[in-house]
Image: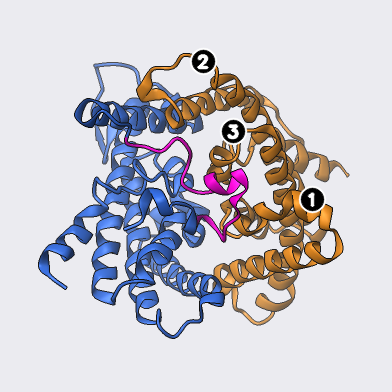
Amino acid sequence: MKELLTILVGALFIENFVLSKFLGICPFLGVSKKRETALGMSGAVVFVMVLASAATWMVNTWLLIPLHLEYLQTIAFILLIAALVQFVETALKKLAPPLYKSLGIFLPLITTNCAVLGSSLIHVQRGYTFVQAVFYGFSAGLGFTMALILFSGIREKLETCDIPESFKGMPISLIAAALVSVAFFGFAGLVLPS
Amino acid sequence: MNVKRMKDVLTAGLLKENPIIRLLLGMCPSLAVTTMAENGLGMGLAATVVLIGSNIAISSVRNIVPDKVRIPVFITIIAGFVTVVQLLMAAYLPDLNNRLGIFIPLIVVNCIILARAEMFACKNNPLLAALDAIGMGAGFTGALFIIGSVREILGAGTWMGMTLTKDLFDPASIMILPPGGFLVMGVLIAVVNKVSILRTGKKAVPDAAGCGSSCGDGEGCAGCAIVNKEGGAV
């Protein structure tokens, strides 16, 4: 239990995927303009990340390691994630149309979201057990959600500010992201029992 | 096929359609690994090698791959080249490989590579695709090198192994920490915008990141590859 709590707090605050690991920057900057789209994207990311962590853990432990094919990890994982995303999209369309409506448009984008592949590579690197790996995927997704929602609030405020022409749009968003990232540095002092 | 077209393709990636500072593609590695000029250079070259390989391969098979399965096929080809680069780096450049960490395997999902496959390589012959890859790769490497240099000089006072700022100022280590990455990137884009406004009266950089921007507004598309159609198509 304590290990899981360590993973959760670590992934949320200390090594937040977006703000300190720089994974998932594209959707972070791309869909954080409005809070609803930020929420939709985050939901889809958490969902796919949990499934992807479970699937990559199983393939890695039961297939790649026994056959000594660890060097195929990158190819195997990205194909697995792409197939998974396709499968989830089809399944949601048939089984849960309302959920598909809110998450559907974000799903194809997730294949190329480096946070998903990143979380799979990290849990392998750290040698997590199955439960830890799935929970890490979930926590990292939550960390992504938190960063995205915090940032969408800031960006909605930025819309009404008087900003010099050359800083409008992306530059000021990046500078705001820098400040949010500085704020998260406050958590770096948290020492977790290992 | 004339020489002028080839030259245009080769030079487009350097400034006019620079993947980072103009199209805002591949932001994750450009923020994460640019704590040192040397890392930026290494990351840029690794991505360039993958880009050249994947562009040539994808352009060669462009007429036999059915349209419906092209994205999975492209991703598989790209992942193959990434694995080759990964193994070569682990064997010959273990130090750099350790410093770049998971961002080497993450070249697979680097938007630049899939975007060039989708926007250029699958519509042009292998020679043009190779030239495009070289130009885009050089633009990417150059931008990473500049960002890395700024961060390393301000944040650590060193540059490519030399100590530069011994008596000038104390380095501000925040520049090599994550916030510095966002900050330098933001200021760099603002400078590009300013120069562009002074020269042409228009901003150079779109208001949203290349990946995911138009999709977020509900248009729906198959990955960041297709997003930049208006902005960056050749």
Of tags 1 and 2, the one toward the viewer is 2
Question: Is residue B115 among the parts visible in the rendering?
Answer: yes
Q: CA distance from mark 2 to mark 3?
A: 14 Å
Q: Which mark is residue A33?
A: 3
Q: Earlier in the sequence, mark 3 or mark 1?
A: 3
Q: Is-magenta flag for residue B211? A: yes
Q: Amino acid at mark 3?
A: Lys
Q: Which mark is residue A112?
A: none
- Badges 2 and 3: C-beta atoms under 8 Å apart? no
Question: Is residue A185 among the parts visible in the rendering?
Answer: no
Q: Amino acid at mark 1?
A: Phe
Coloring scheme of the render?
Answer: by chain
Residue range (magenta): B204-224
Query: What residue does disc 2 label?
Result: A161
Residue name at image x 78 percent, y 63 percent: A93
Query: What residue does disc 1 label?
Result: A135
Residue sitting nearer the eye, B98 or B229: B229
Position of A109 compared to B189: left or right? Answer: right
Q: Earlier in the sequence, mark 2 or mark 3?
A: 3
Q: Secondary structure at mark 3?
A: loop
Q: Chain of mark 3?
A: A
Q: Chain of mark 1?
A: A
Of tags 3 and 1, the one toward the viewer is 3
Q: Earlier in the sequence, mark 1 or mark 2?
A: 1
Q: Secondary structure at mark 2?
A: loop
Q: Are marks 1 and 2 on the same chain?
A: yes
Q: CA distance from mark 1 to mark 2?
A: 40 Å
The chain displayed blue equals B
The residue carrying pointer 1 sits among few (fewer than 14), some (14 to 19) or many (20 or more) residues within 10 Å by Cα, namely many
The residue carrying pointer 2 sits among few (fewer than 14), some (14 to 19) or many (20 or more) residues within 10 Å by Cα, namely few
Q: Position of residue A90 (x, y in %)?
A: 75, 67
Residue name at image x 51 percent, y 26 percent: A178
